[in-house]
Image (cartoon, rainbow, N blue to C red):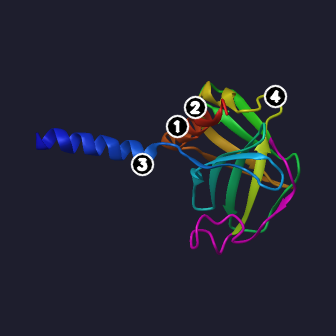
Amino acid sequence: MKKVLLLIALSFSAFVMFSQTITKQEVDEFTGAKIIETDWEKLVYSMKWTAYCRIRIVNEAHYFEVRLMYNSVYSIPEDASIIFKLKDESTYKMKNRDYALSSKGGGAAGKLAGSEMQGTVCSYLNSEDFNFSDLLKSLPTKVRIYFRDSYIENEIKEKDAKTIQSMIELTKDL
């Protein structure tokens, strides 16, 4: 009996640890805009750069937000791309909504993580696939983010790719 209870408890804790949640769901009292946001989740963690992502919905617009920390000053122009390479060898492209210039701690996740690095938070969208559901067709395996005059890219771990798909699944019909 103790083993069964332990197994149930472990299963539940794993579900809680890896499940996606909506962290904000409200109507702005000044503008009347409906705002929905998911948790920030890891996209890439490497020695040179780190990125977290979430889905943010404002009224009917779905944004794929990326919190990026990098080891030098950079800018991301309006309409700069983020491209995902998918497991089926296809690509998925989104465009940045607004110009972003990095600042010290600008993309930091929490009080300590990345607070000394240059960072930004960018909102990407895809005008042809407004809720990113095409990313559910094949697992993202690699990501490339374009700066003003260069780009960075990295592999995406399978666990993180599945988390991204869970986030999209959670919000695709909202």
Give the Cα distance between marks 2 and 3: 21 Å
Label 1 crowd (10 A; few <14 / some 14-19 / many >=20): some
Tell me if residue 94 comes above or below residue 149 in the rendering. Answer: above
Q: Is residue 153 left or right of residue 161?
A: right
Q: Which residue is the site of mark 1?
A: 162
Question: If you read the primary sequence from the N terminus, does the residue marked by circle 3 or circle 1 appear first?
Answer: 3
Q: Amino acid at mark 2?
A: Leu
Q: Amino acid at mark 1?
A: Lys
Please state the horizontal and vertical placement of residue 152, each as a whole percent of the image: 72, 52
Which is in the foreground here, disc 4 or disc 3?
Answer: 3
Q: Which segment did they paint magenta?
A: 95-117
Q: Secondary structure at mark 4?
A: loop
Q: Main secondary structure of the magenta part?
A: loop
Q: Which residue is the site of mark 3?
A: 17
Q: Secondary structure at mark 2?
A: loop
Give the Cα distance between marks 2 and 4: 19 Å
Q: Which residue is the site of mark 4?
A: 128
Q: Which mark is residue 139?
A: 2
Tell me if residue 127 comes above or below residue 68 in the rendering. Answer: above
- Residue shown at 63% from the left, 61% from the top: 48
- Residue shown at 74% from the left, 68% from the top: 72
Question: If you read the primary sequence from the N terminus, does the residue marked by circle 2 or circle 1 appear first?
Answer: 2
Which is in the foreground here, disc 2 or disc 4?
Answer: 4
Circles 2 and 1: CB atoms closer than 8 Å: yes
Q: Which quadrant is the N terminus positioned in?
A: top left
Q: Amino acid at mark 3?
A: Met
